[in-house]
Amino acid sequence: MEALRASASTFQDDLLDENCSSSSSFSNMTQAFSQRISELQQLVCFRVEDSVKHIFVRDIQGIEASVRALEQLFDELRQRTQQEMASVPKARALLQAAELQQQHLQQISSNLPQHLPSTCPAPAAAPAAAAAAAHQQGAAVKQQGAAGTAVLGVRGATSAAAAAADDARGSKAADKRRKDGQAAARPVPGAAPRWYVTAAELASVPSYIKGRLTLEKVNAAVDELAGFAEACAKAMASVARNQLARVGAEERIRLQELYHSIANKEAAKGRFWFLENDLRAGTAVKMDKSGKSMLMLLRHLGRLQEVRAVLDSMGSVTAYVLQAQA
């Protein structure tokens, strides 16, 4: 009896399991059918009728053309970017060169004097020696006119004229002057060298030499001393060409002594120089304590070289030879 009851209970459980399984399978099948129906509804919504199909085709073709144009523009931008990236090193090198040039220009600007001379030869600032001008000013003015005329003359013609004048006189002194002129006749440029002082050079000068001198005063003095040297060179050229007819006797003797005693020296031959007495007519450099300090500073910087000589008419004289920049 108990066995029958157990068998009945087991059969009932199996029947319930089969019913649950059948119910689950039916539910899954219903869900699958519902999902398929939903997909078919979506496909129906996306279905395009033949009457309006050409409209969608035209829109798709327009979108495709726009996309291709954007791709081409993107390629051009990429090529342009690559070109700009390749030119970056060149631009950096150009920037560095510009910065270096700016530094050079700033240094040049900081070292410029207040007054820049013109490229034309400066007019004669003073005669070769101003000592005789104090008692013979008229003769000195005539000497400057004769010296200016001699500078504009042709070298060959003036040399021939000097030789003819010497032959006409037939004096030993004239022959000696002609020989000395040939020995010392080096071509002198039209403008004296103006080797300006830089701020760095002035800063390197000891304070006991520099004193209160400024860069502007020093470079102004360089300009003035170059003017003295140019006037002296013209006077010596007139002596070398024997064009002293309009000069007084005393002035002629003094210039000839300067020519033979200083202009023919190795340190001054073919160079621009001036006498210490010429500073009496100066404004930037005078014959006082500040003027001597200026000359000492320029000698210290290698702008001047001192030459001494003894003349019969003037006694002991001091000349300063301008040095050109190497």
Image (spheres, rainbow, N blue to C red):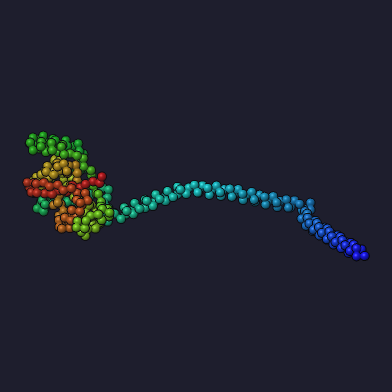
Q: Eyeballing the image, is 71 above or below 173?
A: below
Residue 119 position, x and y percent, is: 27, 48
Residue at x 19% of width, y 42% of height: 270
Task: Name the residue nearer the viewer: 305 or 285.
Answer: 305
Residue 59 visible (yes or no): yes
- Residue 190 is left or right of residue 310, and the answer is right
Residue 274 position, x and y percent, is: 16, 48
Residue 174 figure quarter: top left
Residue at x 25% of width, y 56% of height: 203
Q: Eyeballing the image, is 18 above or below 119?
A: below
Task: Name the residue nearer the viewer: 51 or 173.
Answer: 51
Q: How many marks?
A: 0
Residue 300 position, x and y percent, is: 20, 51
Residue 285 position, x and y percent, is: 18, 55
Quarter of the image containing the C terminus?
top left
Task: Name the residue nearer the viewer: 32 or 142.
Answer: 32
Residue at x 9% of width, y 53% of height: 135
Residue at x 79% of width, y 58% of height: 35
Quarter of the image containing the N terminus?
bottom right
Task: Name the residue nearer the viewer: 198 or 312.
Answer: 198
- Residue 197 is left or right of residue 11, and the answer is left
Residue 244 visible (yes or no): no
